[in-house]
Amino acid sequence: MTTSRRSLLAAGATGTLALTAGCLDFVLGNGPLEFSSDRVAPTDEALEETGYDEKEVTEETIDRTVELPAGIERDVEASIWTSVYSKQLEYKGQEREGSAFAAVSIPGMEVAGRSVNPLDDMSNEELLAEFLNQIDGGEIRNIQHEESFELPILDEQRETDVFMGESDLAGEPIDIEIKITSFNHEDDLLVLLGTLPKMNTKESANVEVLMESVEHPFDS
């Protein structure tokens, strides 16, 4: 597991805070208010069924500053879990990393009953732009929305969006299919994202298997 710091969150919010023991240091400016998320990940059974391997699991700490009444600024820290998986595909007689899947968990961040997490109101398209770089599968360009449908994930039907883009494999352009869904679960915002060559129709179904199998909190 690796830990790093980012400036991912940049929006501001105002509000009042009750002087409870949990946030007294935050109010006085003696320390940040900390939020943590629980990891989300596909099951081992789904990974074995679809042929995906774990590539990287990280817990990153991000920080931001919120503004309280009277112009007072305080620091907030949040931990984000990212689990990335990949699969080798045969292309022109060679094994190459062709498909990838990522599961991201972002904590709910509320101060005085108000969210200070700008990702809360993002659409799947906006979240795709935010998190596509988590999958190291090369640049994907000319991304366009294709369709939306629902998948049963964590006991509810979740809206899933399909996008199409273009990338390069073995020096040749190929069409890339991208599937993404996002929703709130157990006080965390979850983002599930899969990319695959459009020509490999079986992988499209495999990405859905991974999405449908995720557990949260995931007990590793």
Image: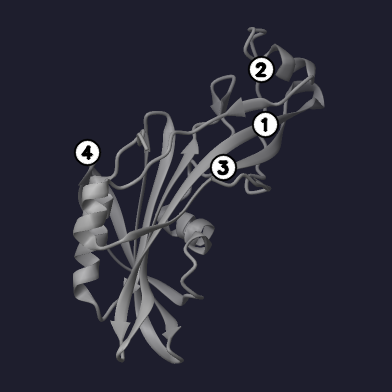
Q: CA distance from mark 2 to mark 3?
A: 19 Å
Closer-to-camera residue (2/38): 2
Write the residue at 19% across / 64% down: 205
Decide which of tag 4 and tag 1 comes sooner along the chain.
1
Q: Nearer the viewer, residue 5 or 142?
A: 5
Q: Amino acid at mark 4?
A: Glu
**Label 2 neighbourhood size at 10 Å, few (<14), some (14-19), many (20+)?**
few
Outermost residue, top direction?
20
Q: CA distance from mark 1 to mark 3?
A: 13 Å
Please, what is the three-letter code of the amino acid marked with disc 3? Pro
Q: Of label 3 and label 4, which has the lower sequence position?
A: 3
The answer to whether the residue labelled 2 contacts the one labelled 1, judged by CB atoms less than 8 Å apart, is no
Whole-percent x and y of residue 1? 54, 45
Q: Is residue 29 left or right of residue 96?
A: right
* Residue under label 3: 118
Type of the residue with mark 1: Val
User: Can you say whether 3 is above or below 78 in the image?
Assistant: below
Q: Is residue 32 above or below residue 12?
A: above
Query: What's under tag 2, amino acid-wise?
Result: Thr
Task: Return the mark for residue 156.
Answer: 4
Q: Residue at x 22, y 52 (%)?
A: 46
x, y percent for residue 59: 54, 43
Gap in angstroms between the C-alphas marked 2 and 4: 34 Å
Q: Is residue 40 visible?
A: yes
Whether residue 151 sits left or right of residue 193 in the image: it is: left
Determine which of the numbered discs, if any, sits on residue 44 in the image. none
> Looking at the image, is mark 1 or mark 3 nearer the viewer?
1
Alpha carbon distance from label 2 to label 1? 15 Å
Where residue 187 appears, x then y in whole percent? 42, 29
Q: Left or right: 112 with respect to 14?
A: left
